[in-house]
Image (tube, rainbow, N blue to C red):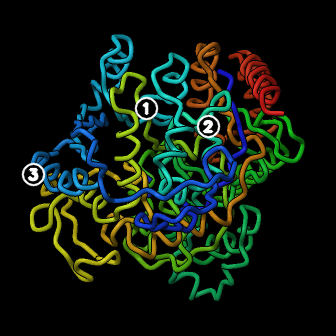
Amino acid sequence: MSRGNKKTKQVVGGVVSMGLLVSVVLSGCSTDKKEEPNATGSSSAVPKTTTAVEPTKELVNISWYMRKPIDTMKDQEAIEAEANKTIKSGVNANLHFNFIDAASWEDKMKLMSASGEPYDLVFTSNWTNAIDSNVQKGAFLPLDDLLKKYGQDILAKVDKRAWKSVTYNGKIMAIPGQGPFTTPNGIVFKKDLVTKYNLDYKKIKNLQDLEPYLETIKKNEPTITPLLVTKTVSAPGDFISDHTNVTKGIRYDEKANQFVLETDIPQFVNNYRTMHDYYVKGYVAKDAAIKTDFTAEAKSGKYAIMRDSGGYTEDGSKSTALFGFPTVESLAFYPIIATSNMVGAATAISKTSKNPERAMELLNLVWKDKKLSNTLAYGLEGKNYTVKSGAGTDAMSVDAKSGAEQTWAIWHNWLGPLWDQWDSGWNSKASLEQMQKNNNEAKTSSILGFLFNGEVVKSEIAQVNAVYAELQPILYSGAMPDYDKFLGEMKQRLKDAGLEKIKAEAQKQLDAWKAQNK
């Protein structure tokens, strides 16, 4: 599907879910007019939204459809009643969530779109209730005018780059939630061994840099396997710089400005030649290709070097907490931010909405009012969370219930304003600041706004995925008898599966996208 890419220039702002640019919060009480950047990149004199409800507005009910965040959702009526005190006062509306079980979610939303059933707000993304397919069938309203008129606080907080990811044929079709758009990759070292051998681990940045230390561990630590690799988790430091993932086996070369096959990238070839060498030298477990539980292996403490636990932390705290023993980390690289990274969570307004203006006003209030967004996310004090410190302030810290005791949760980036999240076990203030730093420091793809639609080559994609599922564990572990022979056979099997056809289709779509966005 062709996508628009109208340039957007607005005030910079906006987990895991799921990174991030610093929010700039605009006061909603001023009646002074001010030149404000808007979603389409122009500047116009727009009065800020006010908290007072216009007397002529009728009370309306706004529905928000969302895939159920957790299976144990309860307390909805009480939480909505509390939230609606603010919503009714602010925009004279009542909000009701419609949570759909994961198993029924996709089918339910497709049926509603097909039948024209009225609803207002809906969760959309690149991974579920896909934004592309919804836009293609005309399920969502363009939001440009609504954002200009009613979405000033949203415009102030959303990362200005993210608008490209939700722009189709020049129209903004959803509001992208703030989130970790990139997760830096770290190389994790068992701290006691680093200390023992006085390793200057911060200087180690890639797979090849590991060789001397791997050799040291192999010679001196008979109970330790130097490098952890499993069936689905590759070695740390095996990154491919300056390339954006497009679909399995195909990447966009940011320097050459073209699609390339992964197996033709020199750095890719060199990395897995290195892994084969490490396997032969005994730095990798002989059964690495059949090990399925990376976390269990890491927790065993039997490895000197591992991949991070889901994101680099400068002090190693995240991996230390998960693996259960002291670790230190070296930053390997920041993956390039691609379109898919920016649409992990978004909110759209249905074309069937009877009150789109009020729906946008409600969304803007969620982005503006920190207490409201946190109430919708965490639930009720004393029932779903308790206050640790800073009661009644924007800097409040809370203990949110988890596990079997958790009866309410909506992830903040599903609502939108992740950076307004209260400090908690979900995300600490420090982790939120780290995510914002990651977003700021990562590069953005030169084709941001382009998202490959694989529908017309879905059979070829399935076949390519099957080849990778079979061969990738061998590639990751380096366990092939002859690397050059293995790589040659892998390339041929991918070609036979239709990878060149997928690449040609991706190029066709990119050409069309570029033509629209000269």
Give the vertical position of 469 relative to 423 (above or below): above
CA distance for labels 2 and 1: 26 Å
Give the vertical position of 313 relative to 140 (above or below): below
Secondary structure at badge 2 equals helix
Q: Circle 1 is placed at which residue position?
A: 128
Front label number (2 vs 1): 1
Whichever of labels 2 and 3 marks the residue nearer the N terminus, that label is: 3
Query: Residue lying farthest front?
Result: 56
Q: Circle 3 is placed at which residue position?
A: 78
Residue 283, given in percent of the width and then of the height, sits at 63, 61
CB atoms of marks 2 and 3 within 8 Å: no
Mark 1: give few (<14), some (14-19) or many (20+) Cα within 10 Å: some
Give the residue type at disc 2.
Gln
Whichever of labels 1 and 3 marks the residue nearer the N terminus, that label is: 3
Residue 268, given in percent of the width and then of the height, sits at 77, 46
Residue at (20% x, 54% y) in the render: 83
Residue at (73% x, 64% y) in the render: 206
Front label number (1 vs 3): 3
Q: Is residue 396 left or right of residue 347?
A: left
Mark 2: give few (<14), some (14-19) or many (20+) Cα within 10 Å: some
CA distance for labels 1 and 3: 28 Å
Give the residue type at disc 3.
Ala
Front label number (2 vs 3): 3
Q: Circle 2 is placed at which residue position?
A: 472
In which quadrant will I find the N terminus? top right
Secondary structure at badge 1 equals loop
Give the residue type at disc 1.
Thr
Secondary structure at badge 3 equals helix
